[in-house]
Image (tube, rainbow, N blue to C red):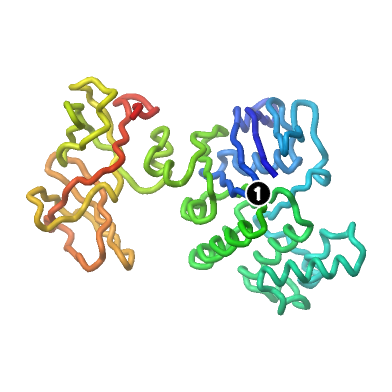
Amino acid sequence: MRLELDNIVQAYRKREVLQGISFQIEQGDIGCLLGPSGCGKTTVLRCIAGFEPVIAGQIITEQTVISGPGFTVLPELRGIGMVFQDFSLLPHLNVLKNVEFGLHVLPPAQRRERALETLASMGLSNTVDVYPHELSGGQQQRVALARALAPNPKLLLLDEPFSSLDSELRHRLSIEVRELLKERGTTTLMVTHDQQEAFSIADRIGVMLDGQLMQWDSGYQLYHEPANRFVADFVGRGVIVSGRVEEGGIRIGLGLLKGGSEMLTPGTVVDVLLRPDDIVHDDDSKLTARVCHKEFRGADILYTLCLDCGDHFYALVPSHHNHRVGENIGVRLEADHVVTFPKYGDQKHPT
């Protein structure tokens, strides 16, 4: 199922919660809405599911309008599955009966067969007689997903599906769920505030703030080509430093960044986004910076490095380069994507 949101607006008591949201998800793709709490991402899911009306714009599936001003197709007629944040498993039913619960339109024998097939695909064949409280958090999540997938929905909505799990399990499950959804060809839209989770599972990610969609793009583009300062700050680590446009590049405290100045007037003062991967640790470099802070991450260390001019920036370095706080280390610029913002503006300069 192809999903399209065309400039939808939703409001509570005349306060607009969603302001002109537009994006598309192609058949079999996985989309994700990413943003801080209260930005409106769950409200988008509820509008798509048919739980909330829209006051402007349209929600379209397979060229059929399912929501518009004064018109909405009933949730049960939309062919959409949904997994809620709290799983919503029925505690008095075992795993098999929980999955069968959404298959009431089928005869009992077919209901059981479909439920067993779906549980097997989730690696849950040995839990059919177990009750929800006897399962681990990861198993409960799989059961909730199996229940949503058993009716073969054309579109699946996931509302913070891994938020109650620990980080290691969350990462592992996100990869497993992506593989399962891709195998089934299920078009999916997920909501999360965890960007690593979004990067792991989604083909396209929408960053939201205050009911507006800031950017709808691949994770790669969000990280390397953010549309504005909020996206630059929200997605990944980075710092904004001051720079001056020169012929052939932009001069910052670390040196000359090549590129990014083609559309700008020499002498213009701009703000420049620097990511940790733009800075390379190089013992042979004449340019040095002082280690102000270090964050050990196992395979690598995230250093906060400081210059005498007052600028600071991040560098991600293999952890066998274990330098002391206060030590000067050699660095060099190696930025493939130069992103600049007007000194007193929000939208990035064209590149």
**Quick one: 240 or 200, which is closer to the camera?**
200
Tell me if residue 79 comes above or below residue 59 in the rendering: below
Residue situated furthest top in the rendering: 265
Would you name the residue on which mark 1 appears? 187
Horizontal and vertical percent for residue 232? 39, 39
Q: Residue at x 65, y 34 (%)?
A: 5
> In this rendering, would 341 be left or right of 247?
right
Tell me if residue 240 comes above or below residue 268 in the rendering: below
Horizontal and vertical percent for residue 34? 53, 45
**Quick one: 293 or 129, which is closer to the camera?**
129
Residue situated furthest right in the rendering: 107
Q: Quadrant of the C terminus?
A: top left
Horizontal and vertical percent for residue 89? 74, 63
Tell me if residue 216 comes above or below residue 85 in the rendering: above
> In this rendering, would 150 be left or right of 244?
right
- Amino acid at pointer 1: Thr
Image quarter of residue 54: top right
Asked which secondary structure carries label 1, the reply is: strand
Q: Residue at x 15, y 45 (%)?
A: 307
> In this rendering, would 252 be left or right of 233?
left
Tell me if residue 238 comes above or below residue 168 in the rendering: above
Q: Residue at x 19, y 55 (%)?
A: 281
